Image: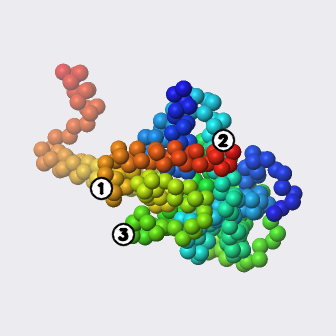
Amino acid sequence: MRRDLAHISEQALIDRLILGDPAAREFLYDRYAAALYGVVLQLVPVKDRASDVMVRVFTWVYLNIKSYQTSGYKTLFAWLLRKTREMAIKEAIPEGSLIGTELIRNEEGVLQRFYVRLPTAEQQVFRLCYFRGLSTTTIARMMAISEGQVNEILEAAMKAFRKFLSDTWN
Amino acid sequence: MELKFYIESGIIESYVLGLVSEAEAEEFQLMRKLYPELETEIEVVERRIERAAFDEAVLPPAEVKDRVMQSFRWEGNGAGAGFGGATADPPPNYTFINIQPKDGDQITVHKNWRLFFIFVVLLAKILLFFAIFYFLKYAQVKEEQKKTGLYYHPSSITVSQVSK
């Protein structure tokens, strides 16, 4: 971690990234790579491919840092996380093996702790949605229920997720 | 009250994670405009998710960092524009190979010139067509005049008509 940047504010960091400052780029990597890598591994549990995703994410971020300001996100990390998940999902889905179970190898993760407590249907919808990035239409087709039902189930799961988050990290 | 209900539905979490549909995203942006206090709650949620993610951070292999740094070093020092010249990096440890054709032998122009070029060629063809067409017409008229022995020059008509 670069000591000269240790106390830089998020806005100052972004300004320096926009200018293409290599020190700022390194700092961004050092600060966020590990947290993002944890997320990527859950979505792409294969080391080489997870590494590829990381390289792609950071290369994209350095080139498109300006779009953060218009993204509607309040924190840099949330924006990075969103992009990371998007890219990881693109890498992860081998078409034709879309099964709601056996998606995750890490049984200890935060999200696992969350969804094991959910009723089966909520669990399945949440996993297909978060880990596979499937639309509610697709999920409805897979589970042979209506899209309205999927939306209801997902909303129940997200309600529970909100409660889980605020209970654990408040 | 409506806002509280909206927040409790977990919509912010869905939005932050990128799980919302397009319609929901639009509605969310509308709600943000209507209720600016939503912004504080969004930030709270983002921070929570950040802390959750940091709790299970995994250090990526060192090779990843090398690749990331390498990829932008190329872009930063190579053809080089785009980033305000703020790349005060140590000298690059690679050889820069210029694959552009030899200077002065070739030029590169903007692709809009293609349209212009096509237009000019078409215009030239049209003008050429008229040139030939009127030349033939002219030759034909001259031929006829020769046959009838009638010469008329515009000025001669006027003069003869006036004199009558």
Q: Amino acid at mark 2?
A: Glu
Q: Amino acid at mark 1?
A: Ala
Q: Residue at x 22, y 37 (%)?
A: B152
| Marks 1 and 2, how far apart at CA | 37 Å
Residue A65 image position (x, y, % from top left): 65, 52
Q: Secondary structure at mark 2?
A: helix
Q: Amino acid at mark 3?
A: Gly
Residue B81 appears in the rendering: no
Quickly name the residue at label 1: A144
Q: Are labels 3 and 1 on one chain?
A: yes
Evaluate if marks 1 and 2 touch, with contact meaning CB atoms under 8 Å apart: no
Q: Quadrant of the C terminus of chain A?
A: top right
Quickly name the residue at label 2: B43
Q: Secondary structure at mark 1?
A: loop
Q: Residues within 10 Å of mark 3 (few under 14, many from 20)?
A: few
Q: Residue at x 77, y 57 (%)?
A: A24
Quickly name the residue at label 3: A96
Q: Quadrant of the N terminus of chain A?
A: bottom right
Name the image quarter holding residue A72.
Answer: top right
